[in-house]
Image: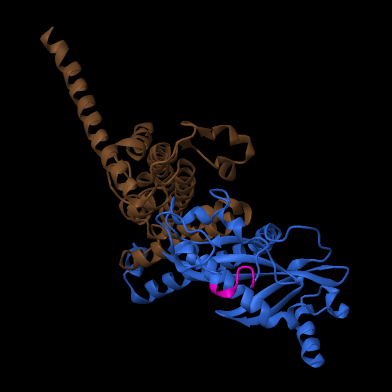
Chain colours: A blue, B brown
Amino acid sequence: MGLDNLRAKLVYQGILLGSVTLLTGGALALADHATKGAIEAAKECDMKQSLTQVLPGQYDNDLLKDTVVLPGPDGDVTVYRARRAGKVEAVVFQVQGIGYAGPVVSMMGVDRDGHILGVRVIQHKETPGLGDKVDPAKTNWIHSFEGKFLGNPPADKFAVKKDGGVFDQFAGATITPRAVVKSVKGGLEFFAREKGKLLDDNPGSSAATPDGGTAARVAAAKEK
Amino acid sequence: MSNIYAKITRDGLWDNNIVFVQILGMCPTMAVTSSATNGLGMGLATTFVLAASNAVIAAGRNLISPDVRIPVYIVLIASLVTLVDVSLNAFAHDLYKVLGLYIALIVANCAVLGRAEAFAGKSKVAPAALDGLMMGLGFTFALTLIGGIRELIGAGTLFANAHLLLGSAFAFLETTVIPHYKGYLLMILPPGGFLVLGFLLAGKRVLDRRLAERSARIAAEPAVA
C-alpha cells in the first residue's frame, strides 16, 4: 500500500494541491481564451441594442468606435457619438442615480441642441411591480423624457411632481422615478458643460478608429 | 448491479431529493425560482456541474489525500462552475443576462460539495456520475416546480421566455394561463419562495406517508386472506 503511506505525507499533499490548481488553472485559461471572442461580440451586440433604442433615426458611423471619455458627475463617462456625413448629430451616454435598492443606470441619447432623444433604464434592482415601471415594457413613463431639454421644463421644474417638477411619479414608488429624473437632469447638465468637446466636427476624427475619441479631444483642446 | 443504479436514480429524483429531503442548496432555490424557465436553467447548469464534479472526484479518489480533500473538491467545483459561467456567457448570452448573477452561486451550493463528500469520494466513476446526474435532475425538477407555481400565481404565465433558454423551437412552451392577470406580487418576491417550498415539503410528507401506508396494507392483505 505505497499510495496510502504516500498520501499521509505533507509533501504529497502539497504537490497534490499544487497540481490540482495548476491543472484547473490551465483548463480555465483555455476556456477563457476560447470564449473571449464570443463574449465580447455578445457584449458589443447588447451595447448596440441599448444604443439604438435611445437613438432613433439613421446614422452612418460605427457608434461603438466613435467615443470620447470625459469626466462626469460619477467618474469617467464614455460618450458614443452618432454622425451623419461626418457631423455629430447626437450623443449617447450612461447616467446613474441612486434608487430604492441601489444604483439605477440609464442610457440617454441627446441631439446637437441638447434635446433628449430617448432614455432607457438598463440596470436596476427596484421592487418588481412598483419601481420597475420605468421599464417601457410595463408603462410609457420613460417616454415622457423625449423632446425635453434644460429650459423645457426649466431646471427647477426638472423633477418629479412631488418635488414640484413636471414628471409623474408612480403610486407607491417615488424614489425610483426621482432617481431617474435626477440622473437625466445631471446628464443634460453634463452635455451642456461638455458640448464643445462632444460635438467636435473635425472630420479627421470621424475616421472611426478606437483612437478617434482621443484625437478629437486633443483637437478640441487645440482649438481653444 | 443494476439494482444499485436503480436505487441511485430513485434517491436522486425522489427519496433523497436535494431540495425536498436534504433541504440543501436553498440559496439558488429561493433566488432564481421566480419563474419556471429560470428554475429550469439553473437546475440544468447545476446538473452539469454535479455530474462532472462527481465524475472527476470519483476518478481521482485514490490520489486525493483525505487530509486535503475539501480544498481539492472546492477547487475542482469552482473551476467547473467557472467553465459553465464563461460558456453560458459566450453561447447563451440572453439566458446569461437572466441567470448570470446566480451561476457563481453554484459553488456555494452545499449540495455539490455534499455529493462529493458523501458519495463521489468513495465510489467508482460510473455510479458517481449517475448520482450527480440524478441528484441534479431531482434538483432541476424541484426548481422548475417551485418556479412554475410561483410564476403561475405571481404572473399568470408559465415558462415565459423559454425561447431564451431552449431556442425558438421551444417557444410553444410559453403560455399565458390567466389572460389579463394583474399579478400577485408576493409570489414573485422572496417570501413566495419560502411559502411555496413550505407547502411542497408538507405535500411531499403527506404523499410519502400515504404511499407507505398503502404498500403496508397491500403487504398485509395476503396474510389475512
- Report the side of A40 relative to B112 (left or right): right
A154 magenta-colored: yes
Residue at left offset 59%, top offset 52%: B94
The x, y position of residue B81, in whole percent, is 48, 58
Where is the C terminus of chain A found, in terms of image quarters?
A: bottom right
- Report the side of B171 relative to B195 (left or right): right
Q: Which residues are magenta?
A: A151-156
Asked if one can make out residue A104 in the rendered structure from this viewpoint, the answer is no
Q: Residue furthest left?
A: B224
Residue at left offset 66%, top offset 82%: A193
Residue at left offset 54%, top offset 33%: B173
Asked if one can make out residue A64 in the rendered structure from this viewpoint, the answer is yes
The x, y position of residue A100, in whole percent, is 41, 64
Q: Decide which of A186, B86 is in the foreground and name it.
A: A186
Q: Decide which of B91, B174 is in the foreground and name it.
A: B174
Residue B141 position (above or below residue B212): below
The x, y position of residue B186, in whole percent, is 35, 46
The x, y position of residue B177, in whole percent, is 47, 31
B79 magenta-colored: no
Q: Decide which of B196, A5 is in the foreground and name it.
A: B196
Residue at left offset 64%, top offset 68%: A152
Q: How many marks?
A: 0
- Report the side of B135 relative to B221 (left or right): right
State the image quarter where residue B217 is shown.
top left
Where is the N terminus of chain A found, in terms of image quarters?
A: bottom left
Q: Decide which of B148, B177 is in the foreground and name it.
A: B177
State the image quarter where residue B206 is shown.
top left
Q: Which secondary structure dominates the residues rendered in magenta?
A: loop
